[in-house]
Image (cartoon, rainbow, N blue to C red):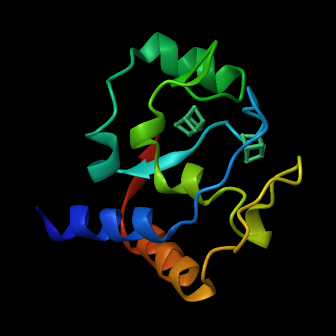
Amino acid sequence: MTPNSQTIRFFRRHIPAFACEPGCHDCCGPVTASSEEMARLPEKSDAAHEAALAGLSCPHLGDTGCQVYAERPLICRLFGTTPRLACPNGKRPETLIDPRIEQRIYQYFKATRHVLV
Ligand code: SF4
Ligand code: SF4
C-alpha cells in the first residue's frame, strides 16, 4: 500500500457516515480528486465528461445515483459532515467530522494535484 493510499484510507475511516435523503444527489456536481482516487474510478469518455460538465454534473452520476459510491472521492464523502459543506436538506451525521481531521483533509487537497473527475 502506498503512503498516499494509506492517507486516503485514513481519511475515509475518519469521515463520519450518515443516511442521505433517499434518491437525493443534490450535492453531486463537478468535483475534483487526486490521481490515487482517479485510478479507482472507471474511465469515462471525453463526451461523457463534456456532457456532465455542460450540465454542471458528474460523469459518475447515473439514474439511480452515484455509480461509484464505494470509491467516491473524499470531497463527496466530506459533504454534509461539516458546516462548510452543509447538506441543503439538513442531513448530517450525529457527530460532525473532527475539525482536526477536516483540516488535514484540506491540507491534503492543497498539497496533492487534483483533477476534474
Ligand atoms: S448530503 Fe444532502 S444533498 Fe447530498 S446526497 Fe445526501 S441528502 Fe442529498
Ligand atoms: S462521484 Fe458520486 S457522489 Fe461524487 S459527485 Fe460524482 S456521482 Fe456524486
Q: Nearer the viewer, residue 114 or 16?
A: 16
Quarter of the image for the N terminus: give it: bottom left
For image coordinates 56% across by 54% down, the residue present is: 77
Q: Is residue 18 visible?
A: yes
| Residue 2: x %, y % from top left | 13, 64
| Residue 81: x %, y % from top left | 68, 65
Q: Tell which residue pokes out farthest to the bottom in this image.
A: 100
| Residue 58: x %, y % from top left | 59, 29
Left or right of 21? Residue 100 is: left
Determine the image quadrant of residue 52.
top right
Determine the image quadrant of residue 68.
top left
Seen in the picture, residue 39 relative to 90 is either above or below; the reply is above
Q: Nearer the viewer, residue 94 or 79?
A: 94
Q: Is residue 117 visible?
A: no
Left or right of 10? Residue 82 is: right
Seen in the picture, residue 31 relative to 63 is either above or below; the reply is below
Seen in the picture, residue 89 relative to 57 is either above or below; the reply is below
Q: Find ligand 1 in the image and state its quadrant.
A: top right
| Residue 18: x %, y % from top left | 66, 54
For image coordinates 53% across by 66% down, the residue present is: 15
For image coordinates 70% across by 74% down, the residue present is: 95
Q: Nearer the viewer, residue 110 or 10?
A: 10
